[in-house]
Image (tube, rainbow, N blue to C red):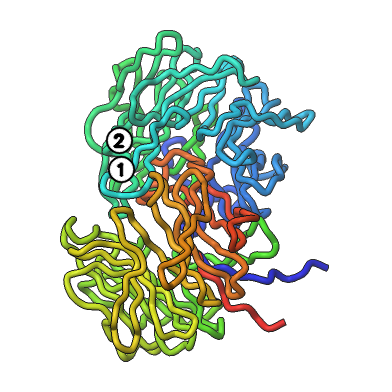
Amino acid sequence: MNAQPRYTIAYSGFAPLNTDIFIADADGHNPKPFLAHPAQDFNASFSRDGNWIVFTSERSGSAEIYRAHPDGTALEQLTDDPSFDDQAALSPDGRTLAFISSRSGHAELWTLDLPTRKLRNITNHAGGHFRPAWSPDGQWIAISSDRDSPKPRRPDGFELIQQTEIYVLHSDGSGLRRLTHTNSYAGSPSWSPDGTQIVFYRASFEDVIRISDPWHLRATTQIAIVDVASGEEKELTQGKGEKWSPQWLDGGRIGYFRGGPEGGAEFLRLDAEGRNAGSGARGEFNSPHWSPDGRKMIYYRDIGQNWPPVVETPSKDARFRLLRTGIFPSFSPAGDRLVFTNGQAALSHNGLLEVSIDGSNRWLIHDDLERNTTAPNWSPTGDWIAFGLGGAFQGFLGTGRVTATIALIRPDGSGLRELTHGDRNDGFPSWSPDGKRLAFRTADKFGKGLRIADVETGEIKVLTEGDHTDNFPDWSPKGDWICFTSNREDNDYEIYLIHPDGTGLKRLTHLPGNDAHSTWSPDGEWIAFSSGRAGFKDETALHPHNPQSYGEITVMRADGSELTALTDNPWEDATPRWAPLKNK
């Protein structure tokens, strides 16, 4: 008999609520669910003979590759590994599956020989590799990859921005060759029927930033082709709007998905120099793929509606139960209630939502129409909830002069009190174990860093200071340490510890990518945080409105050892917080 998990961690996941796959006419009309399931299903494609559909599903827990006939019969699971498996494509002869997997610790191109079930990593490179497509003769695989990316960051931000190009390589991993040189963004390759050209979508660095902005900014991408032999590139489309996921169809046509409020299925005719060949149904068609006979299209979309979620999700370590919730969750001391913000992005307008542990009895206890609410934290004594009130994500003072304060409110929504005041930007409060002090992040005209405030008197003391950025403090349950995020030693953000008196500073993580949102387990044995060490697992532009489509919930011992990732997917998982331990 399996033991129950000792720990529960609530976190915010920026995945869709419930993606289902649909099969429709070629123009997107008359959609019907394909093997609908409560778990996430996505990224489906037809086999070359049209007899199979391969797709990704989390119905068994982790993301695995399945196949079934177009009528839904003969469902078969093809991969079985706790890591992330996705973006599968069958070879023209149907014997080999190419797919993306994080089994090596980052997104690589793998193949699975279906008769023998032999697996092979064919990229063996720490960069990210995405969206494989077989050449018509089965000799080559085209992919997009960020393996040569300079790893730029969002202007005036900390988020890493992806930069991808199109590559081709043999199915044994040999002959790798870079085809495009956009020095910005190229993705989702698809071969021409004669194997001489590849169609893809391209975007500027600025447009990828706009696509990933949580404010739903509109951007422009174009459909282009590259000659496989010469590397010569040519744009096929013009004009504004996002254009994604092109596929070469019969009769010299290319199908793709156009984003935006009026978006939907679109078609080009190549023999007319990219002239529009008609529009299909309007709506969301994520990762569309057309059948070989051109009569059907398969795609996925989010059908979930109940935001914010409170739902248990799979964990890669049975000791740690995971609960996906709204952003910045915090448990009551009794563990029977949760508080979190109610928006879909932390920098958009949020109120404070309090719910029972099963997600019922939802109650908006605070909503300031002019000021945003972020990072609530329930006091150890249960009588207060502290939170940031103002523009915590909208720049430090001196960059837009955005102010924010640390506020307190009773769990019943009464007694609102602002603890800090003035021309400053304060946020992300964490209680001392006795409930008498709060650690928080600040920036004002005198500097920036971590501070500690006396809850009764409002007196503020400096904990850290400097030109670097310190953020997301969390007080240990024993009161002897505060963990936090900082970029003080290199360009990445890492997890640090410091005593509340400002002594004993030490760095815990030395990982690639950003590490943030660290938080202590109730017994002080573990620290959970969001880690970007695995990098991207898909093309950023295919995940709109998410400024950092990377990051997994990760735990480590308080000394930095026993590093263990609990989630593994192409979306951002962040803001973890531990539930109180139940008496055994």
The answer to whether residue 122 of the structure is visible from this angle is yes
Residue designated by label 2 = 205
Instruction: Please give left or right for residue 179 compared with residue 219 in the image.
Output: right
Instruction: Indicate the position of residue 75 as horizontal and vertical percent values.
Output: 70, 44
Q: Nearer the viewer, residue 128 or 429?
A: 429
The image quarter containing residue 477 is: bottom right
Q: Is residue 386 above or below residue 329?
A: below
Instruction: Please give left or right for residue 299 compared with residue 82 in the image.
Output: left
Quadrant where the C terminus lies? Answer: bottom right
Residue depicted at 58% across the width and 78% down the height = 580
C-alpha span from label 2 to label 1 = 6 Å
Residue designated by label 1 = 209
How busy is the neighbourhood of tag 1: few (under 14 within 10 Å), some, or many (20 plus)? many
Instruction: Indicate the position of residue 475 as horizontal and vertical percent values.
Output: 47, 72
Quadrant where the N terminus lies? Answer: bottom right
The answer to whether residue 306 of the structure is visible from this angle is no
Instruction: Please give left or right for residue 535 compared with residue 256 in the image.
Output: right
Q: Nearer the viewer, residue 135 or 451?
A: 451
Residue depicted at 49% across the width and 51% down the height = 551
Looking at the rendered structure, the secondary structure element under dot 1 is helix
Count of numbered circles in the view: 2
Q: Does the residue at mark 2 contact the one at mark 1 (Cβ under 8 Å)?
A: yes
Three-letter amino acid code at disc 2?
A: Phe
Instruction: Indicate the position of residue 568 as horizontal and vertical percent values.
Output: 57, 50
Furthest residue in direction right, as rendered:
1
Residue depicted at 60% across the width and 29% down the height = 124
How busy is the neighbourhood of tag 2: few (under 14 within 10 Å), some, or many (20 plus)? some
Q: Is residue 430 above or below residue 322?
A: below
Instruction: Indicate the position of residue 230 as horizontal and vertical percent values.
Output: 40, 8
Three-letter amino acid code at disc 1?
A: Ile
Q: Nearer the viewer, residue 396 or 326?
A: 396
The image quarter containing residue 578 is: bottom right
